[in-house]
Amino acid sequence: MSSDFKELQSRWASSKKNIELSAANFDNLYKKIKHKEKENYVFYYGTITTLLITLIVISLFFYYVAPVQETLSRIGAGLMIFGLVFRIFVEIISIYKAKQINNLDTTLKAAENSIKFHQFRKTIHQVIAPIIIGLYTVGFYMITPEFSLYMKFWNVVLIDISYVVIGIILFIIIRKGVKKEMQKLQDIMRLKNDITE
């Protein structure tokens, strides 16, 4: 009888240790998740700020510096502006979706929604962003014929070449940021899965 009691007491002590370790582990995992989510929010807000500044500068440029007159040029300017506005809208939706994950009741449901959010961001980077960049580029080159009416040929060629060079540099910088974001989202999903197991 006393050996049964000692065994029960030993099991209780062992279980209590495991519970304490699990609680500490849970708190640690939760802090890591929150930190990575915060870093992603900084990325989202940074993207919105960059796109908004670009939108304002381009809008002011077309309004004050080079108001385009030809229909083709106006369509081009419209494509550029529409692309930026749409991308800003997508980033705002991303922030909304990311914040919805945090408000869910169960950890399992939050893990499922993290996976859906990861797929949503993947779609943005692999489908929506390239379409927007394509429209923006088409819009830019639709304006070029009108610029050639007011500028020397070599200046227009230089502008066209610089657009490609700047585009390549921006592509490399943005790709690094996207890879970091996707890695953080994968880390968040892994950490949430660790909590649910």
Image (cartoon, rainbow, N blue to C red):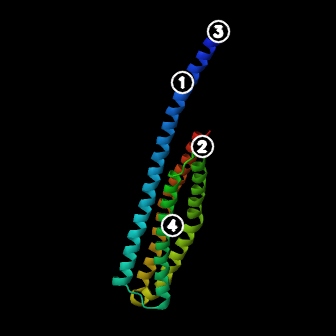
Q: Few, some or many C-alpha atoms within 10 Å of disc 3 (few <14, some 14-19, many ≥20)? A: few
On the image, numbered disc 1 is attached to which residue?
A: 17
Say which residue appears at 37% left-offset and 74% top-offset: 57
Q: CA distance from mark 4 to mark 2?
A: 27 Å
Q: Tell me the element at label 3.
A: helix
Q: Tell me the element at label 4.
A: helix
Depth check, mark 3 against mark 1: the one in front is 3
Q: Is residue 107 left or right of residue 155?
A: right
| Sequence-earlier tag: 3 or 1 | 3
On the image, numbered disc 2 is attached to which residue?
A: 193
Quadrant containing the N terminus is top right
Q: CA distance from mark 4 to mark 3?
A: 65 Å
Q: Report the disc number at residue 35.
A: none
* Residue 176 visible to an observer of this rendering: no
On the image, numbered disc 4 is attached to which residue?
A: 90
Q: Few, some or many C-alpha atoms within 10 Å of disc 2 (few <14, some 14-19, many ≥20)? A: some
Kind of residue indicated by mark 4: Val
* Residue 185 visible to an observer of this rendering: yes
Whole-percent x, y for residue 93 in the image? 50, 64
| Sequence-earlier tag: 4 or 3 | 3
